[in-house]
Image (cartoon, helix red, strand yellow):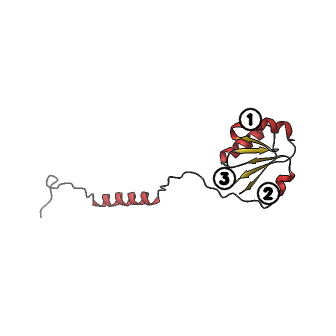
């Protein structure tokens, strides 16, 4: 009977299964990864049925259009003039009553948050948001 000597035996590692597993992992990550250039959050905002009637009846209404224009008591402001708008709102609006923010559905979310934050810093706690489409 012939015994193998350690010097006679050559060590070899089979890499064929390793290559198969690596390719399977690459395919898995390519298939499951999300490749998209648009990183914005798209929201379908709800529509109100009674927008026109409540806008005409409420004196504490701020309208934000998708162009960045703010309308308060038939005066127009832009989002860059938000400090001027807030000063006028602070003088003419009652903090105990409801302030309605009527926002066009295509308006930027950043504008809405900036407007709400500025109003809450002045002490307006009862804010309602209504959306509408033209």
Mark 3: give few (<14), some (14-19) or many (20+) Cα within 10 Å.
Answer: some
Mark 1: give few (<14), some (14-19) or many (20+) Cα within 10 Å.
Answer: few
Tag 2 residue: 51
> Could you give the CA–CA distance between mark 3 and mark 1, rounded to whole angstroms?
23 Å
User: Residue at left 82%, top 53%?
Assistant: 55
Query: Residue 50's spot in the image, x, y percent?
Result: 81, 60
Q: Is residue 108 left or right of residue 28?
A: right
Q: Is residue 30 left or right of residue 121?
A: left
Q: Give the numbered dot on residue 59.
A: none
Name the one closer to the observer, 123 or 14: 123
123 w.r.t. 23: above or below:
above
Query: Residue 20's spot in the image, x, y percent?
Result: 32, 61
Q: Is residue 82 left or right of residue 15?
A: right
Residue 15 occupies quadrant: bottom left
131 w.r.t. 96: above or below:
below
Tag 1 residue: 83
Tag 3 residue: 106
**Quick one: SS at disc 1?**
helix
Query: Residue 89's spot in the image, x, y percent?
Result: 81, 39
Name the one closer to the observer, 26 or 87: 87
Q: Please indicate, yes or no, whether residue 62 appears anywhere in the rendered image.
A: yes
Residue 113 occupies quadrant: top right
Residue 70 occupies quadrant: top right
User: Residue at left 81%, top 57%?
Assistant: 52
Q: Earlier in the sequence, mark 3 or mark 2?
A: 2
> Could you give the CA–CA distance between mark 3 and mark 2, rounded to whole angstroms?
16 Å
Looking at the image, which residue sits at the far bottom?
Answer: 1
């Amino acid at each position: 009977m012939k015994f193998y000597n350690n010097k006679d035996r050559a060590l070899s590692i089979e890499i064929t299964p390793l290559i198969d597993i690596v390719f399977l992992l690459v395919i898995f990550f390519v298939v499951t990864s999300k490749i998209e250039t648009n990183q914005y959050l798209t929201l379908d905002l709800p529509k109100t049925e009674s927008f026109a009637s409540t806008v005409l009846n409420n004196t504490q209404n701020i309208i934000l259009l998708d162009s960045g224009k703010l309308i308060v008591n038939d005066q127009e402001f832009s989002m860059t003039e938000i400090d001027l708008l807030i000063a006028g709102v602070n003088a003419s609006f009652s903090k105990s009553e409801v302030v309605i923010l009527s926002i066009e559905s295509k308006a930027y979310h950043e504008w809405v948050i900036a407007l709400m934050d500025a109003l809450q810093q002045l002490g307006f706690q009862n804010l309602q948001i209504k959306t509408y489409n033209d």
